[in-house]
Image: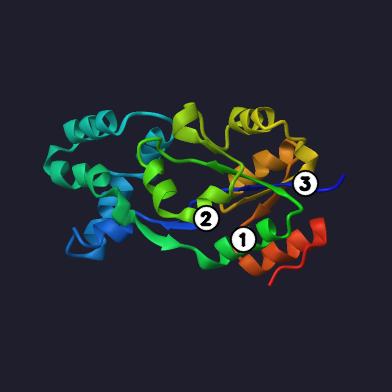
């Protein structure tokens, strides 16, 4: 069956997001920063906001557990934009070339807090290319949950076999593949282009 749709993840594919960009300015040493991010403001904690928990609630709960880091925890929300260094040029180039071919519809599927996503959308104009975007924080569900993939497919009337999904997380790719979507793991952009060529015949620069 022909590919008619591309579904892009955002963080790690199109946008370079990492809390270290902020916290290197806050902590004096890499060791202190890594300890904070691995034991306090962890990726598991951040994923609660991706799944729809209000930032104020998540921050309040964490400060109650780690009051000695109250200031640093609060910065996670207050200075969140500093965690984005900018676009990932190779990923954006793929997006723009696919769009310029006029052969495919483009969709986004991202694990992102509904409170912070508007900053990204308003500051990175290439996100306006997408015909539709599903944001985990808005839907109160996140990848790799099966139901968020179903929501995207049903909302935009997509046949999974006609979709390519590009994501930098293997668990998300595995779930997409289980559902019949053609998952491409994004860890090497040259390999992503090779897979796109195999699946669509579209040769990208």
The residue singled out by tag 1 in the image is 96
Q: Is residue 21 above or below residue 73?
A: below
Q: Are marks 2 and 1 in contact (CB under 8 Å)?
A: yes
The residue singled out by tag 3 in the image is 4
Closer to the camera: disc 2 or disc 3? 2
Q: Which of 124/110 is in front? A: 124
Residue 135 image label: none
Task: Please report the residue visible at 61 percent of the width from the left and 42 percent of the height from the top.
Answer: 131
Q: Which of 151/147 is in front? A: 151
For the view shown, which residue lies furthest in the right direction? 1
Near mark 2 (Cα within 10 A), the count class, few <14, some 14-19 or many ≥20, is some
Distance from disc 2 to disc 3, alpha carbons, whole Å, reads 20 Å
- Residue 80 is left or right of residue 160, and the answer is left
For the view shown, which residue lies furthest in the bottom direction? 205
Which color scheme is applied?
rainbow
Task: Please report the residue visible at 49 percent of the width from the left and 34 percent of the height from the top.
Answer: 136
Distance from disc 2 to disc 1, alpha carbons, whole Å, reads 8 Å
* Residue 141 on image: x %, y %: 51, 29
For the view shown, which residue lies furthest in the left direction? 68
Q: Quadrant of the C terminus?
A: bottom right
Distance from disc 1 to disc 3, alpha carbons, whole Å, reads 16 Å
Near mark 3 (Cα within 10 A), the count class, few <14, some 14-19 or many ≥20, is some
Q: Are marks 1 and 3 in contact (CB under 8 Å)?
A: no
* Residue 58 on image: x %, y %: 28, 32
State which tag comes first along the sequence, 1 or 3.
3
* Residue 179 on image: x %, y %: 73, 35
Residue 193, located in which quarter of the rendered image?
Answer: bottom right
The residue singled out by tag 2 in the image is 126
Callout 3: helix, strand or loop?
loop
State which tag comes first along the sequence, 2 or 1.
1
């Amino acid at each position: 069956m022909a590919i008619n749709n591309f579904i892009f993840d955002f963080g790690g594919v199109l946008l370079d997001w990492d809390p270290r960009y902020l916290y290197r300015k806050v902590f004096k040493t890499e060791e202190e920063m890594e300890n904070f991010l691995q034991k306090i403001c962890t990726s598991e904690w951040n994923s609660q906001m991706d799944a729809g928990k209000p930032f104020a609630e998540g921050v309040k709960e964490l400060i109650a557990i780690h009051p000695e880091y109250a200031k640093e925890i609060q910065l996670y929300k207050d200075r969140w934009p500093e965690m984005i260094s900018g676009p990932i040029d190779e990923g954006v180039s793929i997006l723009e070339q696919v769009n310029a071919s006029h052969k495919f519809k483009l969709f986004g599927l991202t694990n992102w807090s509904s409170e912070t996503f508007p900053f990204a959308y308003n500051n990175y104009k290439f996100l306006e290319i997408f015909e539709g975007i599903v944001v985990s924080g808005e839907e109160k569900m996140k990848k790799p949950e099966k139901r968020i993939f179903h929501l995207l497919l049903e909302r935009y009337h997509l046949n999974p076999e006609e979709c390519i999904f590009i994501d930098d997380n293997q668990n998300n790719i595995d779930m997409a593949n289980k559902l019949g979507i053609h998952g491409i793991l994004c860890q090497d952009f040259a390999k992503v282009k090779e897979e796109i060529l195999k699946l669509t015949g579209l040769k990208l620069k």
